[in-house]
Image: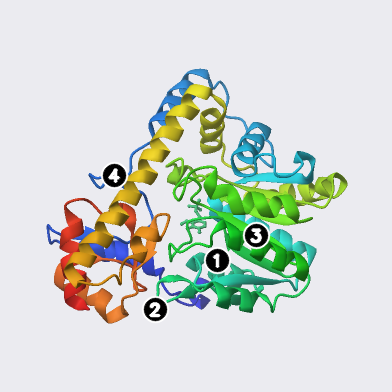
Amino acid sequence: MLNNLKPRPADKILVLSTLFRADDRAEKIDLGVGVYKNAEGHTPIMRAVKSAEKQLWNEEDTKTYTSLPGDAGFHQAMADMVLADSVDRDRISFCATPGGTGAIHNVLETIQAAHPDTTVWLSNPSWGNHQSMLNHLGMKSVSYDYFDAEACAVDYPAMLASLQGVKEGDVVLLHGCCHNPTGANINNTQWEEVAELLLAKGAIPFVDIAYQGFGNGLEEDAFGTRLLASKFPEMMIAASCSKNFGIYRERTGIVMAISADAETAKVTQQTLSHMNRQNFSFPPDHGARLVTMVLTDPELRAEWAAELEEVRTGMLALRQQLADALKAETGSDRFGFIADHRGMFSRLGLTEEQVIKLREDNAIYMVGDSRINIAGLTQKNVPIIAKAVAAVL
Ligand SMILES: Cc1ncc(COP(=O)(O)O)c(C=O)c1O
């Protein structure tokens, strides 16, 4: 049986990590995999999360299963953080999942269960796993124009023009904030216009929000998601806690599905619970419990929000430093967009050959499409990177 399996292409980012680890040059710089790192190159456990963990160790007296869709306290805390009061709570159905990826998977299967023929629209480009999960499930997908590769900014007129092709009942996947891989995002006025267009088309928005708090701030980053939730009769949301709580390996995510009314929401809830049961049964609870404690305890929440803000402003400062250093090295504003982008990534607009040259000659590792992880920048390596990038142009 197993000898019938076909080799699968390896994930490009994971291949890059392997190459990085195998490189014995002391000066090597990792701008590849999408994990937050501090100035020492370490991915720390956030202070409030560590405190919550200590408290939980003292207080937790059972490890029996949680409920099938996860803990209700987690659902409500996440709805508070992502949706606030944009939509009536009795229209939302929930399930806790292993990470944001688990949430995306359950959303897609729920769409499939409702209408197997549904077309899902993805931005071009999008997070690589979006397309690959759609393929894995055998779902129809179309891409909409999103990124102007020359200007390294959102090509908004092209995006609107593409979305004109959306048909009633199509699902349109939007990144809630901090677009991965480009770092380029639509502004609030554009969110309003996109919402109006998709409403007129009878589309169902599906928001993937994996970096809330990494862009313009915790509340600001939820603007688009809340706007859509306040307007659409139906909407799907997959939220990840991996990055903004720094609990990557705890695998913590959630589906929030908005139905047209409370009655429908009950049936949607049964379907979401069913998806959990079929895919992995009860969801992991440790990370979800930590998130709930952090979000609902005023002291822990204040400490977490302060650290998240340090992370966010630290990345903004690094963006500015790299944009300035590149301006000094190249004598042009070509890389000014780095300071305007938001989130953990920016796509530099280099060719694949230039990316390989940087890796081979300078031990600077970035994804083949020239996406860099801003958190991989440091005060020390920014001038080195700027000089090397200017040299390959
Ligand atoms: C856009 C986007 N969505 C979802 C995820 C899933 O995150 P996780 O499954 O690690 O929570 C990621 C992670 O890189 C992402 O970039």
The residue where tag 2 is placed is 150
Looking at the rendered structure, the secondary structure element under dot 4 is: loop
Specify whether 69 is left or right of 358.
right
Q: How many marks?
A: 4
Residue at 42% of width from left, 39% of height from top?
Answer: 308
Image quadrant assignment for residue 142: bottom right
Disc 1 to disc 2, how far (Cα)?
Answer: 24 Å
The answer to whether marks 3 and 1 mark residues whose Cβ atoms lie closer than 8 Å is: no
Q: Nearer the viewer, residue 83 or 131?
A: 83
Disc 4 to disc 1, how far (Cα)?
Answer: 28 Å
Residue at 66% of width from left, 35% of height from top?
Answer: 76
Residue 130 - label: 1
Residue 38 - label: 4
Image quadrant assignment for residue 332: bottom left
Specify whether 255 is left or right of 53.
right
Q: Nearer the viewer, residue 116 or 149?
A: 149
